[in-house]
Image (cartoon, rainbow, N blue to C red):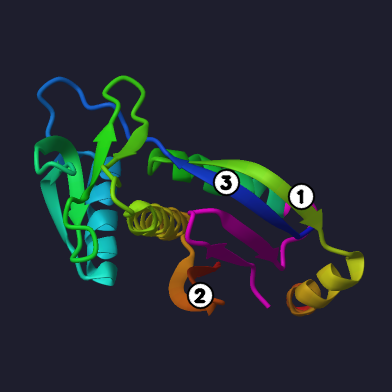
Amino acid sequence: MSHIASYKTKIRLNQLRRGASPEHDPTWRLLREAMEAAAEELGGSVVDVIYDYCGAPTDCDLGLVTDDFPRGIGVRVNPVTGEVAFIYDDYGGFKLKALRICEAIQQSYTTLALARALKELHYEVEMEEIREGQERAVVVRGVL
Amino acid sequence: MGRRVQIKVNRRGEVETEFIGFLGDECIEEADRIRSVLARYGLEIGLVDAIRKSPEQIALETADKETTKQRVRRE
């Protein structure tokens, strides 16, 4: 049987042992790669501090700032559950711009994780960016 | 035709997968294997919807594979 299926996705990083470096964990490395890929796509950069409406800094595990939204989107990882949350201050009409960055990060992480997983399962993998209306989608193809 | 997986990732990170050329329950097993490896890469996936392909579609996808198997048997 072959089939077609749709899935929702959720990012959940590994819990880091006390004192362990995030750079040594594959999920944390993947998050950084996904942030860098999203930054490249949106013309932004990866940071470790973001700002609120008043200009006050807020620490985050990783952040992404763009010209469109210089306050930045932060990513915080729950140290107990590994769940990823986006933090940002969209006050003043920045809701859509902030959402656009969150979506780019989510899409980037999902795409990279899928490509890595398929490679690990010995697929030959290729990726293609496509447009569906105004929306960017990525097709990951694996051949055994 | 070999076994293939095609996965479309939309902007919200939702994915649509298509398994091509898998016989019997192979694609269910393969989906489970992929899901298991993805979890190690920090990505949890939850099924929203699944559609089984018709026997005609599967026959078309696996035609080359069956031919190859028969050739091997004959040799």
Do the residues indicated by labels 1 and 2 lie within the same chain of the protein?
A: no
Separation of disc 1 and disc 2 at Cα? Answer: 37 Å
User: As rendered, which of A144 and A126 lies closer to the eye?
Assistant: A126
**Disc 3 residue type (three-letter):** Lys
Q: Secondary structure at mark 1?
A: loop
Residue A98 on image: x %, y %: 33, 53
Chain at tag 1: B
Residue A134: mark in rendering: 2
> Was residue A140 drawn as part of the magenta stretch in this picture?
no
Q: Position of residue B64 (x, y in %)?
A: 75, 80
Q: Does the magenta segment cover residue B19?
A: yes
Q: Chain of mark 2?
A: A
Name the amino acid type tagged 1: Asp
The circle drawn on residue A8 is 3
- Quadrant housing residue A107: bottom left
In front of the other: B74 or A140:
A140
Checking the image for residue B25, the label placed there is 1
Mark 3 lies on a secondary structure that is: strand
Q: Count how many numbered circles sit on residues in the image.
A: 3
In three-dimensional space, the C-alpha distance between marks 3 and 2, rounded to whole angstroms, equals 21 Å
In the image, is residue A77 above or below residue A126? above
Residue B73 falls in image quadrant: bottom right
Identify the magenta region: B1-26
Looking at the rendered image, the disc whose residue lies closer to the viewer, 3 or 2, is 2
Residue at image position (90%, 65%) is: B55
**Which quadrant holds the N terminus of chain A?**
bottom right
Mark toward the start of the polypeptide (3 vs 2):
3
Name the residue located 40 percent from the left edge and 39 percent from the top edge.
B40
